[in-house]
Amino acid sequence: MAGIGVKGVQLFRVTEPVACAPAVYEPTVVAIVSGTKEAILDGNRHVYDSRRYLCCPMSMPVEAGTPAASPENPLLGVLISLDTRVLSEMNLEMERAGGPLRKPAKEPYSAGLTLAQWDTDFSEALLRLVELAKEPVDAAVLGEGRLREFYYAVLKGEAGSSVRQAFGVGNEIARTIEYLSARLHEPVSIDEMAAHAGMSRAVFHRKFKQATTMSPIQFAKSMRLNQAAMKIAGGMNVSEAAWHVGYVSTSQFSREFKRMYGETPKRWSQATQLPAGVM
């Protein structure tokens, strides 16, 4: 990946096919200029290209890859990290101003992973943002403003409902995921997560599954195993990776890893490569 001089904005190019593999998406928007990319969440495959961008406003355990990339048909795209503080402030500003807010196409809907159509505002804001790569001084002076303009286009667009659900009033699920993500190395119970969200266990379970498509326990396990898989693919040994995500027993970790990915951690690592910059 290559930065453009604006914090959280990176360009990427992939010229070899990469099978979908475990990853953890942080709050981000991924816009594909050429080629196609895939993300799998809870068994559901999301394929996006230059007609639809991916918006992930909350940390999510996924499988991601670029199976169709090749030297003749490279994947070209832009990754824009979502600043939770700025988006929360902008969302409140829009609510106070009574700005144009698109309603979700259907209810209930998942805020965890959304594919949205490129519209004129999104395309123009993205172009103005990427153009800053041409001149470092422009990036330093105008970057923050252009990034806010891009965020505004996302909030107004088809993905706006999921972003507002994550960053607006009543964003207890997003905050709980942030709480969990910072504690993957220690046990966190459903009761503890529900208490952090200020909900009863039953209400929390229902709202969490609505937002992420997974139960809280399934989500926590996927986050831990995906993080461990990424560490193993990066060269960390199995026992150390297991310890880093809260497993005391390496044998239990290996059993759950095999149940999720179909192979033991050792065999999986021998057959899997996660190139830098592919997520």
Image (cartoon, helix red, strand yellow):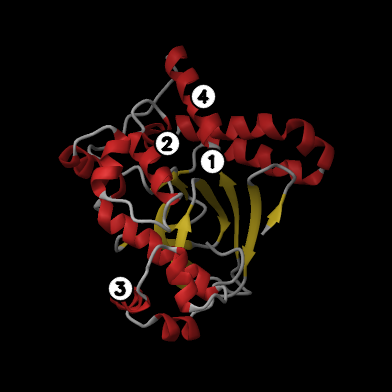
At which x and y percent is residue 237?
51, 78
Q: Earlier in the sequence, mark 2 or mark 3?
A: 2
Locate residue 4 relative to residue 38 in the image: left or right. right
| Amino acid marked by disc 1 | Leu
Q: Is residue 45 visible?
A: no
Give me the C-alpha separation between circle 3 and circle 4: 40 Å
Label 1 element class: loop
Q: Residue at x 43, y 32 (%)?
A: 167
Give me the C-alpha separation between circle 2 and circle 3: 32 Å
Name of the residue lying farthest toward the top:
97
| Amino acid marked by disc 2 | Val
Residue 89: give its label. 4
Residue 163: give its label. 2
Viewer-nearest of discs 2 and 4:
4
How many C-alpha atoms fall within 10 Å of the one at disc 2: few (<14), some, or many (≥20)? Answer: many
Residue 256: give its label. 3
Give me the C-alpha separation between circle 4 and circle 1: 12 Å
Q: Earlier in the sequence, mark 3 or mark 4?
A: 4
Q: Residue at x 41, y 80 (%)?
A: 265
Give me the C-alpha separation between circle 2 and circle 4: 12 Å
How many C-alpha atoms fall within 10 Å of the one at disc 3: few (<14), some, or many (≥20)? Answer: some
At which x and y percent is residue 254?
35, 78
Nearer to me, 277 or 198: 198
Q: Which residue is mark 1?
A: 82
How many C-alpha atoms fall within 10 Å of the one at disc 4: few (<14), some, or many (≥20)? Answer: few
Q: Give the image quarter of residue 126.
A: top right
How many C-alpha atoms fall within 10 Å of the one at disc 1: few (<14), some, or many (≥20)? Answer: many
Q: Earlier in the sequence, mark 4 or mark 1?
A: 1
